[in-house]
Image: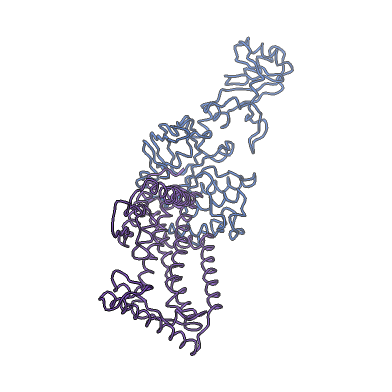
Chain colours: A purple, B blue
Amino acid sequence: MNLVRAELERLAARRFVQLMVVLLAAAFAVTVVTTLAGSHRPGPAELSRAQAQAAESVRQMEMTYDRCLRIREGTLPPGENDYLPRDCAQIDPAQIEELPSAADYLSGVFVFAKEAEPLLYFLIAFLTLFGFLVGASYIGADLNSGGVVNLLLWRPRRPLVLAAKLGTLLGGLLGLSVLASAAYLGAFWLIGQASGLVGRTGGDFWPSLAAIWVRGLMLVLLAAALGFAVATLGRHTSAALGTVAAYVVVWELGARLVFQILEVGRPDRYMLSSYLAAWLSGEVRLWDNNACGPGISGYCDGSYTLTWTSGLVVLLGLTGALVAAAFTVFRRRDLI
Amino acid sequence: MSAVIEIAGLRKTFHTLRQGRRIAVDGFDMLVEAGQVHGFLGPNGSGKTTTLRALLGLVRPDAGRMRVLGAESPEHLPDVAGRVGAIVESPQFFANFTAHRTLRLLALAGGVPTARVDEVLEQVGLRDRGDERVKGYSLGMKQRLAVASALLKSPELLILDEPANGLDPAGIREMRDLTRSLAEAGVTVLLSSHILAEIQLICDHVTIVSRGRRVAYGPVEEVLAGFDQHQWRVRVADPEQAGQLLGRAGLSVTVAPDHLVVTGVQDPETISRTLGEQGMWVRELVPLRPDLESVFLELTGDHEHVAVPRQVDGAPPNDGVIDLDVRESREVDA
């Protein structure tokens, strides 16, 4: 416990960590200020006009759907500009996830329900980067500066020391992420209340947002563990940064190009970024350029889906393997 | 006396892509007993630091047995780690941490009362600057901080690898006094240093390592005595003639331009009487006793460097710790 306390204090006292927290606070402040400056609370007339526009839009959708049904039944001849999907259910307003609302027709008004998801994704992206860099530099700087050796002279159990460091990192990061998320979303909710609109937060709004948040937190922790593991293996912070840069350039860009030239089927399934997107957004629909080649006639759906489950398995498996490798190597390594 | 450090048959080979296979320690043995201030000498790359790192569980040996305070190392090192203070080479610290915070974190991690921090800062003379960031410290101050970190645990065994690195003469003297006071308080000290005169001044026992093997060990006086060639420096009006006289008397003589060195003579009276009987009067007759540096260089195969006469700190110029320039001498056949 003492070791964890000491590590937590060491982590919090790191200048790099402090700098990243300041950057997070600065980004937060800038976003809040610009949102506040660009938003106003709509008046009754503005609101009723937007509501009327939304109602009109919904009415148009219902008419289009109704027309589609009648054309399919043959009771109405199709017009030149009619949009006719294979199945009219595709444009059934009752089945559409989100119908137009007044918020869509309000200009210069911050609507929390509409903006919460992209704001949360921005926060997750920042925290993921933060987690990776802090994870890598926390152990990388310690290994490079001899801090780990100093510590091992006090606590010669290597796995325990490394586990304490990783546990402290993940615990601290989780705490910071929870606080930052609460402050971030709370602040924008208040802006919606005071200087905009909260919007429709009923139904599955909060559960859906919570699911993204939980997946985001998991991603932040995985990124931190990944950075920590690679920096441990490479004995340096730059090892982690270099590995990521090399991976992006060599595999995500280079190999993707080679796959395209060789016409390899479904190349996206070999890319970590696909599983990252699948995990974060619940699922990702990808297109296989080679699926519908010249030999195929008629309708061809070349798309395929990666679910959050496969995303989790790949990300967890990769991180787990690297962390296990880092512990194994660190346990046996000569610290010279 | 109980053994505090026991090393037997320690071997360690490093394999690197650039340098290939390099034997760092090759069957090294060492014994340090309780209460000793034990000097650990060896040239660069002789395996000193590798030995200390292996002893402290930082390097995995290929073979050999090590015990620290009775516990097998590295298996049972955690059982005694709280009683062993150590610095290995020049430890680095986070530059933007203060000395106080650096030590506080170590104390916290090691379960030592944080009240010890001020005590050890006082001990190493950093109390007034404990709240300054380490990046503003000189090399010597960082070294003191390292020693302070080793002292935090109130250790029974203190392992110091080059503690005088970067210290100015006053700092070296303070470190020497500190080491002595710790030894007087019953702390066993293992001191690795390149400053041989320092080792000779502080240590009562010594182990000398060369190319990964122990080449000499024991009480400092005994090690030095083992290399005493019973040499005498003689100054006379005519060294050339005196050399011939002494050579004819069966003595081994080396003649230099302004003096001569007689080797293998237990009683200096033999020299003065031999010369006096021929009417040649001795102006100076000084015993040339080996110092640790000459023994060290002899053992580690570096005696070509024994060229510049030098005075060891604290010793008078003519007390037998002067090495002669052997390159300018020539042997006189007996």
Point out the image quarter for the C terminus of chain B.
top right
Which residue is more in the foreground, B74 or A97? A97
Quadrant location of residue A88? Answer: bottom left
Q: Is residue A112 above or below residue B115?
A: below
Vertical relation: A245 (above or below) A57: above
Say whether residue B156 is left or right of residue B138: left
- Measured from the top left, where is residue A132 in percent x and y? 45, 58
Residue A159's x, y, as percent?
Answer: 37, 52
Q: Is residue A56 left or right of residue B252?
A: left
Query: In this picture, is A256 found above or below A221?
Result: above
Q: In x, y percent, where is residue A153?
A: 44, 50
Query: For this view, does A29 lie left or right of residue B75?
Result: right
B23 vs B54, nearest the viewer: B23
User: Looking at the image, which residue is at 43% across and 57% down?
Assistant: B110
The one of A57 and A191 positioned closer to us in this rendering: A57
Q: Quadrant of residue A166?
A: bottom left
The residue that appears at 27% across and 74% down in the rendered structure is: A72
Residue in front for this viewpoint, B93 or A229: A229
Quarter-of-image position of residue A37: bottom right
x and y percent of residue B28 in the render?
42, 33
- Residue farthest along the bottom direction in this orientation: A44
Location of the N terminus of chain B by quadrant is: top left
Farthest residue toward the right?
Answer: B237
Residue B35 seen in this snapshot: yes
Residue occupying image coordinates x 40% and y 79%: A100
Q: Is residue A153 visible?
A: no
Could you tell me how many numbered marks the image carries? Answer: 0
Q: Residue furthest left?
A: A73
Q: Is residue B276 left or right of residue B118?
A: right
